[in-house]
Each structure stands twice: as C-alpha cells, then as structure tokens.
Amino acid sequence: MDISYIINELAEDRENYYNAIAPPIIQSSNFAFNTVDDMRHAFADEYTTYLYSRGRNPTVDILRKKLAALDGADDCLIFNSGAAAIFAAVLANVKQGDHIVSVNKPYTWAQKMFNVILPRFGVTTTYIDGRFIENFERAILPNTTLIYLETPNSWDYALQDLQAVAELARAEGIITICDNSYCTPIYQKPIAFGIDLTLQSATKYISGHSDVIAGILCGNNKMIKKIFDSEYMNIGSGIQPFNAWLLIRGLRTLPMRLKHITNTTAAVFDFLNNHKQVEKVIFPFDKDFAQYDLAKQQMSGACGLMSFVLKADSIDQVESFCNNLTHILMAVSWGGHESLIIPKCAGMSRAHFNPAKPDHRLIRLYIGLEETEYIITDLQRGFNALLQ
Ligand SMILES: *Cc1c(COP(=O)(O)O)cnc(C)c1O
C-alpha cells in the first residue's frame, strides 16, 4: 500500500463527518444502541463493535488502521504508553513456568517486567547478546515461549538478525516480539521478516512533537484479537481519543520529518566523527559499525539517535560539555522536534565515575528538526567549554 495513501486517506471516512479534512475527536466514553438486539450483539463481541471506549473508539480506530498498514500487519492496538504495549504483549504470551529469552539491555521497563514482576509468577528470563544467532540457540529451553528483541538498541545500537531469529523461533514454536521504536515502520518492518509482534513507543517519532505518551502493538488478527479480549481490556490502558488524534496529526509529517532528520544526522555524524575531542561515535549506518552490513540489509534508514564518547579526563569536563550547550536540551526521550542529550554519567554517582571507562564518558545525542548548522554550532560550544 502506498505510504502517502496510508497517511492521508486510509480509514478516513470523511463523508461521515461533513467532509472535514481532519477527523473528529470522538471524545465519548460510551455508545448508544437502538434495540436490545444491537446491544446484545455488542456485548457478545466488543472487538467488532462500539460499546465503551476502553475497548473500541472511532478516532482510535482510524489510527489503528493506518499504523497496522504501515507495519504490514493485519491489526494493531494503541496503548497509553509504550511500556503498556510491552506489558500487554509479553503478558499475553507467558504463563506460569514459562521462560523468556531477551536481548541484553532491552528498554528499562521491559527489563523491570522481566526482573521484578514476572518472577513472582514463575516466569524466568535469560538475557543474551543478540548480535549472534548461536546465543539464541543456546538459550532456548524446552519451556521457552517468548523471544524479546529490540533492534537496534537505543543506546549501543546492537542489532539482531530479524529473519534468522524469526526462523529459529518459528521452528521451535516460540513467539517473537520486536521493539521497533528506533526505526519505526518507515525504516524497518519486522513483520516482513517473520516476527510475530512488533511494538513502538509512539511517544517518539509517531507523535514527533514531545507532547504525547503512547505505544503501538501490531500483529496478525488472531494474536491482536486475543490481546484485545484479554490484556488490553483488562489492563485498561488504551489510548484516549484526543491523544490518538494527535498521533494521526503526527503521522501526516512522519516521512518528511524522518527524511530531514536523516540528512541532518549524516552531517552531524561527520562533524562528530572527525572531531578531535571525540574518541568514538556509535551509529548503525556508520561503515565502521560492527553490524553495518546487517543494518543495511534489514533497515532502509537510520537517523536521530547516535552515541559518542568524549575525550575527557574528568567528570567535570563531561559535565562542562553538557552544561554549556544552549540549544540542545538535556532531557530523556527522543523523536520530537528538539535535539536532546543524555550523558551516561547522569545515571551514576560522581564518585563512581572512572575516566578510563569509555562508557562513563558516553553521551547519547538525539537530532531533532533544527537546521544542521544550529546543532553543530551548539555542539562546538560544548567542546570549547570542555577545553577550558
Ligand atoms: C521510550 C521507549 C519505550 C517506552 O515507551 P513509553 O512511551 O515511554 O512508555 C520503549 N522502548 C524504547 C526503545 C523506547 O525508547
């Protein structure tokens, strides 16, 4: 399906709402019936009817259809956060005594679910270096029901070979879930490689304006209906109509935002990679990146996030670099209009800092929608401060 058609027309039933170009926000908790029989039908199957907005809502449905089509999936559910999408997807596919194989360092709240919540119900998790398929083969146990992927990782950009993992999992009857937040379906379609469920934090690129928290889960009809009927309805963390409307608006400009960020990212990458105060830049579309060939094979683009290691002798120098940026903001998240940094050392005590460890001097940079020169000039301001 044509991407412009998906974004501009698919699921927009304009004749039903005065030919308005922008869809209405159906901000209603419940829907009325004309006959008892209609109501009975809705009670029998909420998945196919409008009864109550914890289940289905017409504004949310427009977004569901667009996002499913973008991912090449049958259907899609939209949650009030990416974390909720992860929670529902995982919970739906494990029972007491099951085992999960997860990549190392998945998103923080996926990790907390695996480490803190699931063990209470007898579900255990083995973490592996997902860059090597042998590690998956070795970690699979007779009770493994789920493989959890995130490619690329949003800090070190480690990749998994989606097709190889999907083939292995299928042969063993194991469900696969992939966090696709870094690429979005514009740059990577996990379902085309045989992955069962793909999810994203819509808070990032789909929203694109740093004003919505939301999550997306896509898969085949059978799996999505099963999750809708159970975890989605029971957790009750579906997206609200107004936020769904904001995401529809964000989607309109998603391809052009990614295009712009991709160009700026290449220029900023070159600037950092050639800078004498930078030890190393980590970015999946760098020819020197260890998994460059795989990145090129399964991703049609890479942009926005990259990490770099500062040459610094002390934590004061790292902090000085960060504190002296005037346009690039220091904040979590990414995918919005504004460029951002997070220094790794903000997550550790100052006493623990060891300049000999490159990891302690690591800074994650997100490149927003500003012009290249504006970003580079600001980074140079940080480098100047580092020398003083
Ligand atoms: C932000 C993020 C999430 C969680 O999404 P929320 O919308 O914040 O709940 C999951 N995975 C990745 C890779 C993320 O960056």
Image (cartoon, rainbow, N blue to C red):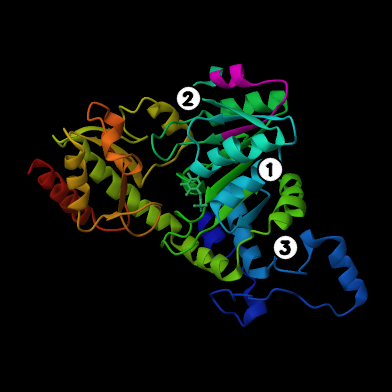
Look at mark 3 in the image and give the residue it sits on: 55
Amino acid found under the numbered disc labelled 3: Gly
Which of the marked residues, 3 or 1, is nearer the chain's N terminus?
3
Determine if the C-beta at disc 1 is less than 8 A from ligand 1: no
**Picture residue at 34% right of the left edge, 36% below the top:** 283
**Picture residue at 29% right of the left edge, 33% below the top:** 352
Q: Is residue 363 visible?
A: no
What distance separates the C-alpha of mark 3 from that of mark 2? 38 Å
Name which quarter of the figure residue 79 lies in. bottom right
Q: Which mark is residue 52?
A: none
Amino acid found under the numbered disc labelled 2: Arg
Q: Is residue 269 visible?
A: yes
Look at mark 2 in the image and give the residue it sits on: 131
In this rendered view, identify the residue nearer to me: 271 or 314: 314
Q: Residues within 10 Å of mark 3 (few under 14, many from 20)?
A: many
**Picture residue at 36% right of the left edge, 25% below the top:** 290
Rendered-image quadrant of the C terminus: top left
Q: Position of residue 184 (x, y in %)?
A: 49, 47
Q: Is residue 279 magenta?
A: no
Look at mark 1 in the image and give the residue it sits on: 91
Per the image, label 1 sits on a secondary structure element best described as: helix
Q: Position of residue 299 (x, y in %)?
A: 46, 38
